[in-house]
Structure formats: C-alpha cells, structure tokens
Image: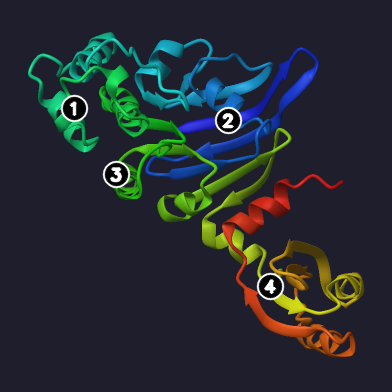
Amino acid sequence: MISIQNLTKYYGTALAVDNISFEIEKGTVLGFLGPNGAGKTTTVRIITSYLSPSSGRVTVDNFDVQTESLEVRRRIGYLPENAPLYLDMNVIEYIKFMQSMRMEVSSTDGRRLKEVIGLCGLDGVIHKNIGELSKGYRQRVGLAQAMIHDPEILILDEPTAGLDPNQIIEIRNLIKELGEEKTVILCTHILPEVEATCNRVLIISEGKIVADGTPSQLQSSFEGRGTIVIQIKNNCESFIEKVAGVPGVERITASGKITEGLFNISLETVKGTDPREDIFNLCRDNDSVLLEMKREETSLEDIFRKLTRKES
C-alpha cells in the first residue's frame, strides 16, 4: 500500500530524514512514534505529497507522491495536529464543503455524510459554528473531514487531543475498526494509545528508524532489561551513590524527596540480570530502610525512552 525507499530530506543543510526505507501493508494500524524533531512529521508530509523528498522514492498504491500526487491525495485522509477548520462555518456546511472539494462520488445522496457524522459523534452539533465548539469537538470535525471521501489510507496526527476519557475510548475503537479494512498511520505521543490500537510500531529518532515491529515483538526484544522501583528512607544520598556500583544496575533515576528523608528510586537493569538481592543487602549495610521494592515489566514507554534518549 505505502512503499518508502531510501527516503532522505534536507532543510537547507539540516538533515531531517536520513535514508529510511519501510513498507506499510493494507490493514495495518501503524503507530509512528518519535520525539520532537525526529523526522516523523516530515515523513508524513512527504507521504501526503505536501513536501518533496531530497532523494529516494515514496509510492502510495503504486502512485508516486511527486509525479502522481493527485492520485495519492485521492487515497489519503489526513488529520494534522492542528485541524484545518473554518471557524465561521457550521459543522455540516464545513463537512459538505470538504466533501465537494474531494469530489466524493456519493455526495449527492447524503449517505456518506450521515455515516461520517455518526461515526465521529457529531449528531448533536451539526448546526453549530465550529468556532463555538470545544477542542474535543473540533478534533472530531477534523477527523470527519479526513474520512469524508472514504480514503484507503488515514493519517492521524494526535487524533484524541482534547477529548475526554469516554471520547478517547470511542475514537480508539473507531481506529481499530477502520484498521480492519484501511491502512492507518497514527502519530501520537500517548504510548498507551499505541498499545491499545496499533498492530505495528515504528520508532524514528534523529531521522533514522530505530525500531519496527509489533508491540509484543518490541517488548520481547527488550526482555530482561527490567526496571526496579524502590522506596527507601534514611541515608538516601549515600545509598544512591553506592547503588551505582551494584552489578546489573545500568541507570539510576531518583524522583526526589517525598517527605523528609524518603526517596523513590528507579533502577534500570542490564538485560539478563536481577540485582534485587544485592540491593536489599546494600540497604541493610547502609542502614537504609527498604519500604518497597518491585520489578516492573518493560513497557512501550520504556522502550521509546531507551531508543530515543540522547546521552548527556
């Protein structure tokens, strides 16, 4: 469905995307992740024919994004982070306008319009001006304009921004439902959302792909690289200094004092190690009181941080 081969993009002398290649098959719900400035938005804008690559080739359904951009745009529905809304239009006028701009073939009978309004939960606000709507409802209108022409591919940038918890669940379920027959690219910083909706995750950092696979595959690749969270009191500063020397402890994050003399400490451990017994013995020898110790499973958030963190 989408093929990216040796894609590179420069802004002047600044390299934004560095020779990346990947393909996305129909029916994939792809979580496309990366820190700010990683090249994620640039890649998406090239896929949508908004930007031209410096080198490489991108095709959508075998149509080249540079030479056949109109065919590419017909197949894509795009919801940018800041949805392109006309605030002085009411909801139904705006969606009809976007439908006519898309030259959607079923626009005359109104069936697609009613379907999209229902899917996006806009029935109660169709005659309100967009400028009067909450951020959450504006986001729904933006999603409706991306879906109105029934595209084969949906690219959604932070689609649940501004929604309340119930609305978020509704949009997540809609994304999963759409992914059964469409290709969906979901750009978000809400990693639990990716775990809940996506069947593939691609992480980009500094213009390069650093991970690609299903959420379970990525977690398996980091199996054994656990995190141990402890809570101690008494002699906390000396404990933090000494625990750095415990075999298997790779990185230490102390969250600061909760109350006087009480610390929460997160210890990232080397793959294949379990230093909990040594940590317990260190507490005893350091005259520190161990109030809590638990081993946490590696989450998608942990993986994201490990792969995109810049070393100081």
For label 1, the SS is helix
> Which residue is labeled 1 in the image?
125
Between label 2 and label 1, give the one nearer the viewer.
Answer: 1
Q: Earlier in the sequence, mark 2 or mark 4?
A: 2
> Which residue is labeled 2 in the image?
4
Classify mark 4: residues with Cα within 10 Å, few (<14), some (14-19) or many (20+): some
Q: Which mark is residue 61?
A: none
Labels 3 & 2 near each other (Cβ < 8 A): no
* Quadrant hosting residue 61: top left
Q: Residue furthest front?
A: 260
Q: Nearer the viewer, residue 204 or 230?
A: 230
Give x and y (percent) for residue 155.
Answer: 43, 31
Classify mark 1: residues with Cα within 10 Å, few (<14), some (14-19) or many (20+): some
Q: Which mark is residue 174?
A: 3
Q: Amino acid at mark 3?
A: Leu
Identify which residue is drawn at 25% across, 24% down.
Answer: 148
